[in-house]
Amino acid sequence: MASRQEQFAALVENYSRVVSAAIRRVCARRFQSLIPDVQQEVYAALWKRLEGGKEIEHPASYLYKVALTTALAQVRKQVPEGPIDAVDAVVPQMAVGFAGLLPAERSRLLAEILERLPPDQSRAIRAHLAGFSHTEVASLFGWSESVARHRIYRGIEELKERLKGTVDGRTDSRLA
């Protein structure tokens, strides 16, 4: 029976392409700088599993899954969680009324609206406002491109409606 070090070396050698492909799929162009750190984390997780004496039945599947989840976790850390002050670009017709608010009021209002949206729409909009394309949003959250496009589009439409009601001074029951 091979030693843990030999098992580790063999797995790294045989499946490094699988790990690299999974990481590149998630990190794409925007997060290339994360690739070495993610690879290190994947191999550290593999080492810990081998050290724990746990058997890996399907190494390709296991390593692919670990690489994807590790890369997604690292990328998610890079996406801002708070409200993003880029609504003017997404909702230009609201820019005049929305621009009249102080930055703190804009952030507070946007945060309130995003909190009340469905969680997937809120995440999609936050990522979109951070500059991610619908393809990157899909990859980031493990959705298909059509699902990401739909959630962004529907979320922006909902955001427009809620902002319009709030900025125009009308009472928006959905915001309250």
Image (cartoon, rainbow, N blue to C red):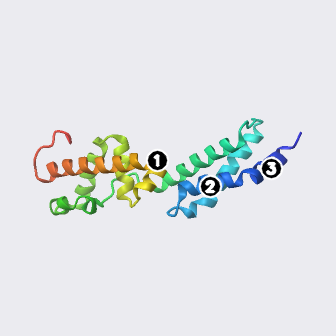
x, y percent for residue 1: 89, 39
Residue type (three-letter) at the residue carrying disc 1: Phe
Please, is residue 34 above or below residue 172 in the view?
below
Q: Quadrant of residue 37?
A: bottom right
Label 1 or label 2, whichever comes before in sequence order: 2
Is residue 89 toward the left or the right of residue 1 in the image?
A: left
Asked whether the viewer can see residue 101, the reply is no
Label 3 or label 2, whichever comes before in sequence order: 3
Please, is residue 135 above or below residue 171 in the view?
below
Residue type (three-letter) at the residue carrying disc 3: Ala
Asked whether the viewer can see residue 72, the reply is yes
In the rendered image, which residue does mark 1 sit on?
A: 141
Badge 1: residue crowd in 10 Å (few <14, some 14–19, many ≥20): some
In the rendered image, which residue does mark 2 sit on?
A: 21
The residue under the point 24% across, 46% down is: 158
Estimate the spatial distance between the alpha carbons at disc 1 and disc 3, rounded to whole Å.
31 Å
Please, is residue 91 above or below residue 166 in the view?
below
The residue under the point 76% across, 51% down is: 14
In the rendered image, which residue does mark 3 sit on?
A: 10
Label 1 or label 3, whichever comes before in sequence order: 3
x, y percent for residue 12: 75, 52
